[in-house]
Amino acid sequence: MIRIENANLIYDMGKGTETYALKNIDLTIRENKFYGILGPSGSGKSSLLYILSGLKNPSSGKVLYKESDFNKMKNKELSIIRNSEFGFVFQRHFLIDYLTSLQNVLVPLDSNRAEDINRAKDLLRELGLEKEINKKPNQLSGGQRQRVAIARALINRPKVIFADEITASLDHKNAFEVMKVLKAYKKETTIIVVTHDESILEGVDEIINIWDGSIKDDKSKQVKKCMK
Ligand SMILES: Nc1ncnc2c1ncn2[C@@H]1O[C@H](COP(=O)(O)OP(=O)(O)OP(=O)(O)O)[C@@H](O)[C@H]1O
Ligand SMILES: [Mg+2]
C-alpha cells in the first residue's frame, strides 16, 4: 500500500547544521495491518511518519502510495488523498477551541446528518468520553483531548491512520484502551503507530525498530548482541 525505496531525509541541507534524520530506508506497508514504529527520542520516528504520509518529501529516494510516487503527484491530488484516505493523530492535538468534542470529531465530515452524529457519539463513547461529548477542549484533560483527536481521525473511515506518540499523555489503562479501539479498526484500515513505549505495541502485526535514522531488523539486532 505504501512503499519506501531507498529514502534519505536530511534537514537543513547545506546549512552546516545538516541532520541525517533518515538513512537508506526501505519499507513496505501492507493493507489492513497494524504497525508500530519504535525507537528512542530523536531516532527519526516522526520523520518516517512524515515521509510515509507525504507530508514531507525525502531528500532522495521514493515514496509510493498505491504505486504512485508522492513526489510526482499534484498538490491537489495529494491533499485529496490526505483528506479522504488518511487520518492523522499527532502529539499536538490541533482541536478547535470553540467547538465541543462532538463538533470537533465531525469537522472532517462537515456534516450534520443524524447517522454521522451517532457515529461520532459512538466513537467518543468507545474512547471513554461519554461524559465529555459536549465539553470544549479547555474543559478536558490532556489525555481526553488526545482521545477526541483520535475519534476525529477515525470518523471518515480512513484507509491509513498515522499516529504519533498518541498514548504519551495517557496512563496505562487509557493507553491500552486507545490501542484496543485502534486495533478494532484493523479490518478496514492500515494503522501506523509511532511510540518509544514497547509495552503498548503488544499484539501488533509488525514492529519497525528505528535507531539513529535507520531501520534495524531483528537479524542485525542479534548480530549487535553477539558483538557485545
Ligand atoms: N525540522 C527539523 N529541522 C532540523 N532537524 C530536525 C527537524 N526535525 C527533526 N530534526 C532532527 O531529526 C532527527 C530525527 O527527528 P524526529 O523528530 O524524526 O525524531 P523522533 O524519533 O520522532 O523523536 P521524538 O521521540 O523525540 O519525537 C533528530 O536528530 C532531530 O533533531
Ligand atoms: Mg517524534
Image (cartoon, helix red, strand yellow):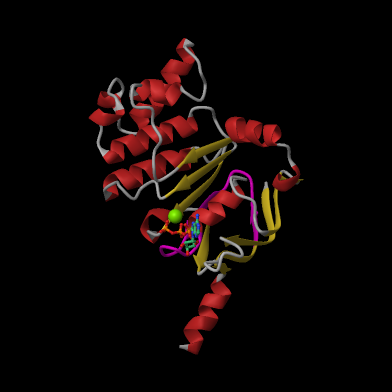
Where's residue 141, x and y in %? 25, 37
Residue under the point 61% across and 60% down: 9
Q: Give, as a single range, the part of the protein colored magenta.
A: 26-44
Q: Kindly tell me whether residue 134 is visible in this rendering.
A: yes
- Relative to 28, say whether 149 is above or below: above
Residue at horizontal 60%, vertical 35%?
82
Q: How many marks?
A: 0
Q: Quadrant of residue 16?
A: bottom right
User: Does residue 202 appear in this view?
Assistant: no
Residue 98: give x, y in percent of width and height.
Answer: 33, 22
> Residue 27 at x, y = what percent?
64, 59
The correct choice, above or below, for 32 with respect to 44 in the image is: above
> Is the C terminus in the top left, top right, bottom left or bottom right quadrant?
bottom left
Residue at the spot x=38%, y=31% of the render?
95
Find residue 128 and report its horizontal and vertical position in percent: 30, 32
In the rendered view, tell whether residue 98 sits above or below residue 201: above
Residue in the picture at 42% in, 36% down: 150
